[in-house]
Image: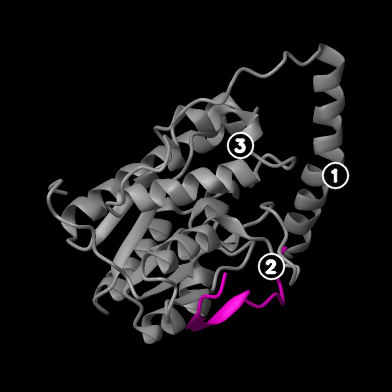
């Protein structure tokens, strides 16, 4: 964007996706929902016009695959006619063995094209790179890299689409940007993603979201072992049970903001 060109102001915003966009593991709000980067983004956009009448809906639900996102959220999002839509999905598919990455790409493209057809600016994301922070993630990298290239190619070919590149941001190698389950962002991680989206939309930088955190005190070997055992027991075990029984953490869960309503912070 030309430095002399003012960034587009938005009067309404709809968030579509899974737990990443729902805001899992950010701070809890009084109503029991997580805050999340999308809420933080909505707050910043609402503040640009004094918050008067800025509309915000968040249709994202944890655990959803890209097909479920398209089937359960897309029609509602397109029907709201929002000026800005964020669309994130596909990583839950990649985490499952036997993922059909071509099908993920096709569903993601169809969703983005439908949203662009409404006249909205559509923001897509590349996944963070888990290879340096999460053991066992090497098997996921071919699909993650392919999905990254797909998203970048889609955005290059579609005016009105914007990409937020999280993959190249080395700060996400730091476990302090992640919650205890190692799959969802910590509050600091959510704060940085919100800022990344704002900058991708042409807003001036409030801070360097890519910057490394100050060095952390070294963790002793046994502390790391205890942390890994706790992670396996509390998070990996239940996740495997859900996979084996065909259940999802989002089953029966409604969206936290199912209607496009004025954002009140």
Element on which disc 3 rests: helix
User: Can you identify the residue that label 1 sits on?
Assistant: 234
Residue at point 50% right, 83% down?
261
Q: Is residue 251 magenta?
A: yes
Q: Is residue 190 left or right of residue 78?
A: right
Looking at the picture, tell me which residue is in the foreground, 130 or 213: 213
At label 1, counting other C-alpha atoms closer than 10 Å, the crowd grade (few under 14, some 14-19, many 20 or more) is: few
How many numbered discs?
Answer: 3
Q: What secondary structure do most residues of the magenta stretch adopt?
A: loop
Q: Which residues are magenta?
A: 249-265
One can see residue 185 in this view: no
User: Can you identify the residue that label 3 sits on?
Assistant: 177
Q: Is residue 116 left or right of residue 265?
A: left
Cα separation between marks 2 and 3: 23 Å
2 or 3: tag closer to the N-terminus: 3
Cα separation between marks 1 and 3: 19 Å
1 or 2: tag closer to the N-terminus: 1
């Amino acid at each position: 964007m030309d430095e002399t060109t003012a960034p587009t102001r938005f009067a309404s915003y709809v968030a579509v996706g899974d737990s990443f966009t729902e805001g899992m593991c950010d701070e809890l709000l009084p109503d029991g929902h997580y805050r999340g980067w999308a809420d933080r983004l909505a707050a910043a956009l609402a503040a640009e016009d004094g918050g008067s009448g800025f509309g915000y809906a968040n249709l994202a639900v944890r655990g959803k695959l890209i097909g479920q996102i398209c089937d359960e959220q897309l029609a509602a999002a397109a029907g709201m006619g929002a000026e800005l839509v964020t669309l994130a999905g596909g990583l839950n598919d990649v985490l499952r063995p036997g993922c059909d990455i071509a099908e993920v790409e096709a569903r993601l493209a169809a969703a983005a094209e439908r949203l662009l057809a409404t006249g909205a600016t559509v923001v897509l994301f590349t996944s963070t790179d888990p290879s340096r922070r999460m053991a066992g993630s090497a098997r996921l990298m071919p699909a993650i890299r392919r999905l990254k290239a797909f998203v970048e190619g889609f955005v290059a070919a579609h005016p009105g689409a914007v990409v937020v590149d999280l993959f190249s941001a080395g700060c996400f190698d730091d476990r302090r940007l992640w919650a205890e389950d190692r799959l969802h962002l910590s509050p600091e991680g959510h704060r940085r993603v919100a800022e990344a989206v704002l900058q991708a939309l042409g807003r001036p930088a409030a801070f360097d979201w890519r910057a490394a955190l100050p060095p952390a005190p070294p963790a002793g070997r046994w502390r790391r072992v205890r942390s890994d055992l706790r992670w396996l027991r509390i998070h990996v075990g239940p996740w495997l049970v859900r996979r084996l029984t065909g259940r999802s953490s989002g089953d029966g869960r409604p969206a936290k903001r199912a209607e496009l309503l004025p954002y009140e912070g």
